[in-house]
Image: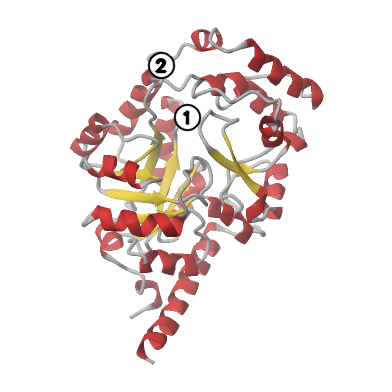
């Protein structure tokens, strides 16, 4: 069997992809590169306006042709109904606003010239519905639901001919997702970047596989190499979901200060903080996470209050290159990515290492 076919399985054949590797990224160019390299690219669109999502999905489709790709939205419950920033600002406690001003003054952060990525609109039902309208009209192949998978959204998505994927971080979340007509589950362990739970990948994945039955499961959290891919398949997963792997690729558009921090980081250079959005977010350790972890710091607010509290400041930090405070979401697998490579090179190395590991495993079993 040709090397490139040795990792094929039921899910990859169903989707028409060469390798059982799903790549989550916020950069459309990386989505396209993952698809061209034989994987399944997924565009993280949560922080994009509906107009931006429509443009980016059309651009990706033009780049990838008939190859399948997906889009991800985070759809938490309990969000406000309307995109009303003034209403959110009126709820911000004075102590929290004072703490943010202290950080600005301590690090000499100049005012932002525009709203930050997290504060240019309020995470709300209004915005989510407008985002979904665009996605439903598009020809994207899959909707990935992170932090929440509402039944009405799933049913609507499937009625439009798209697959639905749900990310879960615990058996409790998996039970809830499996009660709905989803097509794929991602079991995301504690090692993962961005929003993550408390259960380690090796403990979580087999539990979710056993619960899922015929629903294919992808393993996420700490996945970086072909050995990780083989381990995921051995645990019963049908593939892997990777995000951190693409952050240091040549195609990923990123400020050079952040790129250098990521390239230099090890697994123990990541921390979980709620300081960006109010939700747990694994990121590169920085003065930002340290300030919010200090004993005298206030407890981060719930989403979307924390978004609006700190969003403009986070934008100003990157805009004015306040190096000490600059940070980026990343998982513990960042330790494996210490040089700039192309997406195709990363994919090739993962696949080649996984295929090379198949024969020793077979030999060990036969002895």
What element does badge 1 sit on?
loop
Q: Quadrant of the C terminus?
A: bottom left
The residue shown at (56%, 32%) is 274
Q: Which of marks 1 and 2 is in front?
A: 2
Say few, some or many: other residues with alpha carbon within 10 Å of mark 1 (under 14 / 14 to 19 / 20 or more). some
What element does badge 2 sit on?
loop
Task: Please report whichever mark, 1 or 2, sits nearer to the chain's N-terminal start.
Answer: 1
Residue 45 at x, y percent in the picture: 44, 35
Residue 311 at x, y percent in the picture: 60, 23
**Would you name the residue on which mark 1 appears?**
48
The answer to whether 253 appears left or right of 6 in the picture is right
Relative vertical location of residue 309 with respect to residue 329 in this rendering, above or below: above
The answer to whether 234 appears left or right of 224 in the picture is left
The answer to which image quadrant residue 17 occupies is: bottom left
The residue shown at (42%, 69%) is 230
Say few, some or many: other residues with alpha carbon within 10 Å of mark 2 (under 14 / 14 to 19 / 20 or more). some
**Would you name the residue on which mark 2 appears?**
80
């Amino acid at each position: 069997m040709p090397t490139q076919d040795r990792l094929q399985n039921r899910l990859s054949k169903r989707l028409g992809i060469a390798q059982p590797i799903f790549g989550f990224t916020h950069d459309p160019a990386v989505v396209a590169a993952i698809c061209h390299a034989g994987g399944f690219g997924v565009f993280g669109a949560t922080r994009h306006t509906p107009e931006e999502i429509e443009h980016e999905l059309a651009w990706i489709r033009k780049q990838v042709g008939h190859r399948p790709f997906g889009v991800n939205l985070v759809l938490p419950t309990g969000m406000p109904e309307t995109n009303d920033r003034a209403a959110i600002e009126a709820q911000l406690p004075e102590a929290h606003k004072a703490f943010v001003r202290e950080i600005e003054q301590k690090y000499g952060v100049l005012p932002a010239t525009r709203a930050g990525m997290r504060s240019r609109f309020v995470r709300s039902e209004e915005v989510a519905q407008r985002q979904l309208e665009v996605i439903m009209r598009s020809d994207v192949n899959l909707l990935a639901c992170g932090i929440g998978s509402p039944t009405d959204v799933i049913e609507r998505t499937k009625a439009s001919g798209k697959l639905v994927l749900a990310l879960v971080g615990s058996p409790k979340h998996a039970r809830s997702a499996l009660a709905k007509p989803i097509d794929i589950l991602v079991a995301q362990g504690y090692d993962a970047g961005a929003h993550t739970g408390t259960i380690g990948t090796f403990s979580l994945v087999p539990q979710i596989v056993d619960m899922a039955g015929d629903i294919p499961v992808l393993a996420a959290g700490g996945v970086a190499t072909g050995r990780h891919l083989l381990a995921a398949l051995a645990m019963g997963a049908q593939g892997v979901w990777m995000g951190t792997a693409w952050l240091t690729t040549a195609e990923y558009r990123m400020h050079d200060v952040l790129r250098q921090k990521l390239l230099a980081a090890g697994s123990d250079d990541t921390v979980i903080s709620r300081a960006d959005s109010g939700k747990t977010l694994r990121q590169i350790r920085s003065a930002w996470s340290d300030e919010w972890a200090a004993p005298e710091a206030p407890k981060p607010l719930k989403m979307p209050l924390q978004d609006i509290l700190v969003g403009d400041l986070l934008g100003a930090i990157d805009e004015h290159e306040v190096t000490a405070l600059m940070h980026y979401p990343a998982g513990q697998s960042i330790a494996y990515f210490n040089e700039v490579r192309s997406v195709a090179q990363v994919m090739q190395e993962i696949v080649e290492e996984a295929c090379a590991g198949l024969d020793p495993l077979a030999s060990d079993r036969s002895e």
